[in-house]
């Protein structure tokens, strides 16, 4: 009887273990989460300015969470009048014309400049869309594996990068309640607003800021910051929203919030990154040789061009010009109709 009870306890223990969430491979996480990741572009009326970043679909009817600085015109201090969102293709080819073929319009629902969060609603999309689970971040600790998905400038669209949680910072940059993860996961301009995902495939952060250059010009590496998902969930609750796994209650239209500046040592990722200072070479001057022993000068090797999978500024500029041209055509057509 005792052995039967031991065997039964072992079976129950195995059953309990089988229901525990297991760690996924980066490939499994990407296949599960990337369809809910989008590219976000904001455009000015003139067609001369704009911003680009990443967002996450957190509701099947097309609600997107991103950074406020992706959709706020820094110069004007107010939201861009036009927002374009691009849905992920089945396969990312590296050709931006085909990779960004699935474009939809979006409206800004609400934003918080201090927290650097914004909520968008896609227009004219067929629900249900794939979503990413906006989870609680409390269980994530320093040393845990994480991945980021986004569109880093000079890299590929819908890029996956891996790393770990390096530190936790409460009240980031002096903003009460703005709690962030520091991560060494590679982030660059274009990753703004994208998801930081844990090893179980849950979104536990919103990629927000990078530190790249110290005050003395020394380059900084592997220092990036992601707003904790618990902060985003609390903000959504304050908007009158309840998020529960993948069955959230519909979002109401909320008020926009005032803009705020971000200190220069933690740059929002749409900002240009200052070039590092060049340190003068300490190599001694070359020795003089006699003409008899002089050899033909060695031709320097051509420096290979840096990889440019896509240029964020050019992409945003082209899209802004297209928006301005479209507006001009509409105005012209309306004028002709009035003349008739």
Image (cartoon, rainbow, N blue to C red):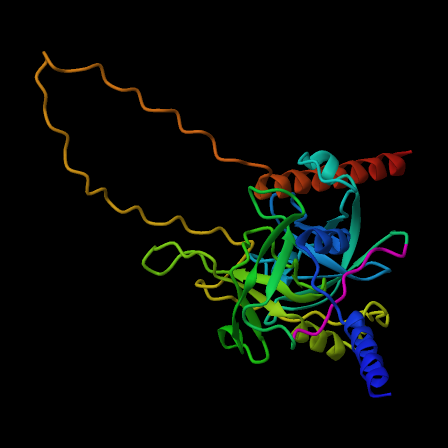
Whether residue 136 is in magenta: the answer is yes
Q: Is residue 263 visible?
A: yes
Work out whether residue 82 can be spotted. Answer: no
Q: What residue appears at the point 57 percent right and 71 percent down from the top-left corner?
A: 180
Q: How many marks?
A: 0
Query: Can you say which quadrant of the picture contains the C terminus?
Result: top right
For the view shown, which residue lies furthest in the top direction? 292
Quadrant for the N terminus in the image: bottom right
- Farthest bottom residue? 2
> Is 99 placed left or right of 221 in the picture?
right
Q: Is residue 55 left or right of residue 49?
A: right
* Residue 142 location, quadrant: bottom right
Residue 332: within the magenta? no
Classify residue 336 as left or right of residue 310: right
Is 3 located above or below residue 134 in the figure?
A: below
**Which of the pair 309/15 is nearer the observer?**
15
Q: Position of residue 152 (x, y in %)?
A: 58, 48
Task: Tell me where residue 105 appears, x and y as whole percent.
Answer: 79, 50
The stretch in magenta equals 127-137
Q: Quadrant of residue 291?
A: top left
Residue at point 63%, 50% (across, down): 160
Q: Who's the residue at 8% across and 17% down the image?
A: 290
Observer-nearest residue: 258 or 38? 38
What residue do we see at 63% from left, 40% from top?
A: 315
162 vs 235: above or below: above
Q: Main secondary structure of the magenta part?
A: loop
Residue 90 percent coordinates (x, y): 79, 42
Expressed as whole percent of the image width and height from the top left, the position of residue 177 reads 59, 79
**Quarter of the image where one finds residue 295:** top left
């Amino acid at each position: 009887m005792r052995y039967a009870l031991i065997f039964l306890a072992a079976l129950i223990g195995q059953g309990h273990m089988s229901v525990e969430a297991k760690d996924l491979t980066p490939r499994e996480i990407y296949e599960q989460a990337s369809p809910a990741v989008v590219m976000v572009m904001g455009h000015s009326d003139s067609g001369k300015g704009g911003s680009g970043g990443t967002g996450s679909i957190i509701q099947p009817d097309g609600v997107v969470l991103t950074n406020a600085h992706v959709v706020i015109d820094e110069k004007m201090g107010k939201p861009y009048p036009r927002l374009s969102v691009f849905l992920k293709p089945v396969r990312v080819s590296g050709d931006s014309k085909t990779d960004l073929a699935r474009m939809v319009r979006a409206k800004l629902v609400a934003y918080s400049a201090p927290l650097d969060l914004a909520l968008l609603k896609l227009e004219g999309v067929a629900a249900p869309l794939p979503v990413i689970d906006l989870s609680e971040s409390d269980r994530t600790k320093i040393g845990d594996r994480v991945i980021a998905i986004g569109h880093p400038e000079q890299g590929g669209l819908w890029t996956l990068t891996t790393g770990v949680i390096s530190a936790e910072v409460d009240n980031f940059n002096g903003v009460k309640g703005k709690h962030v993860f520091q991560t060494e996961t590679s982030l660059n301009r274009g990753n703004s607003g994208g998801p930081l995902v844990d090893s179980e495939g849950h979104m536990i952060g919103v990629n927000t800021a990078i530190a790249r250059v110290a005050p003395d010009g020394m380059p900084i590496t592997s220092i990036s910051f992601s707003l904790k998902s618990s902060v985003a969930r609390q903000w959504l609750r304050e908007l009158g929203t309840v998020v529960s796994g993948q069955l959230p209650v519909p979002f109401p239209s909320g008020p926009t919030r005032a803009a705020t500046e971000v200190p220069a040592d933690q740059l929002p990722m749409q900002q240009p990154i200052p070039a590092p200072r060049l340190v003068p070479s300490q190599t001694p001057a070359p020795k003089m040789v006699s003409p008899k022993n002089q050899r033909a000068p060695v031709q320097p090797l051509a420096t290979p061009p840096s990889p440019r999978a896509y240029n964020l500024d050019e992409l945003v500029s082209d899209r802004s010009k297209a928006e301005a041209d479209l507006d001009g055509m509409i105005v012209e057509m309306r004028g002709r109709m009035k003349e008739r």
